[in-house]
Image (spheres, rainbow, N blue to C red):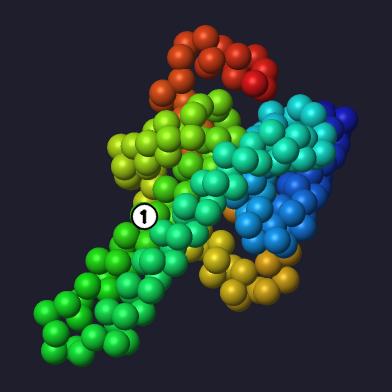
Amino acid sequence: MGRFFNSRFFDGISKITDMLIIGLYFLICSIPIITIGASLTALYYGIHKCVYKGRGYTLEFFHSFKENFKQATLSWIIFMVMFGILTGDIYITKNVISHDSPFAGMFIFFTVLLILTILWAIYHFAYIARFANGFKESFKVSGIFMILNIGWSIVLLGVLILLGLLAYRFPIFLIFLPGMVASAVHPILERVFRKYMSAEDLAKEDDNVIY
């Protein structure tokens, strides 16, 4: 019994260590800003493969980073443009337009759009990490997943808010936040992804095969 608990304890420590290391890889590779998309994809891939599947090493992060660099970077540029436009719209409708204007309340609409776009980005980069698909198709499918599973998307948003508040209250967690976030959202996203996977792909997953 003691040997069993020791094994589980050290396995847990190993997974936590892998999570933190992969999170640090993400922070380092995100420094150029333009590479954040590839880093997000590699972060999810590394957490999925090393922490949840227990296969491979943390350096698998760089395998995904390199393999998905082009698609993830182009995707990130598009999302940055959308983030910028929506953020600008929120600022203008909240701070520039007169409060008496019928458009004054539009900042709520743009805020909701920004939140949905952030959730879409999370689905999108996780989707790229897990499945091989075309550039346009990945955008379409990840967006559909986010909308069709709006309940889980709301749960996902709640998790992000809670972890954000934790990091705000205890800034030391900022260093560990990437790995913590990826590990926290992974079960939610995988629950969604598995709904649309074929029986053959599910069998491979259950056999602990990464593809």
Residue visible at 62% across and 40% down?
Answer: 70
Residue on which the image places disc 1: 116
**Where on the picture, by quarter, is residue 85?**
bottom left
Work out whether residue 16 can be spotted. no
Camera-side residue of 178 and 100: 100
Residue 82: which quarter of the image?
A: bottom left
Question: At which x and y percent is residue 101?
Answer: 14, 85
Q: Position of residue 138 (x, y in %)?
A: 46, 34
Of the 4 image quadrants, the one containing the C terminus is top right
* Helix, strand or loop for disc 1: helix
Please name the residue shown 46% across and 14% down the image. Answer: 198
Say which residue appears at 19% left-offset and 89% top-offset: 99
Image quadrant in which the N terminus is located: top right
Say which of 125 and 7 sits in front. 125
The answer to which of 188 and 70 lies nearer the viewer is 70
From this view, report whether residue 31 is shown above or below residue 60.
Answer: below
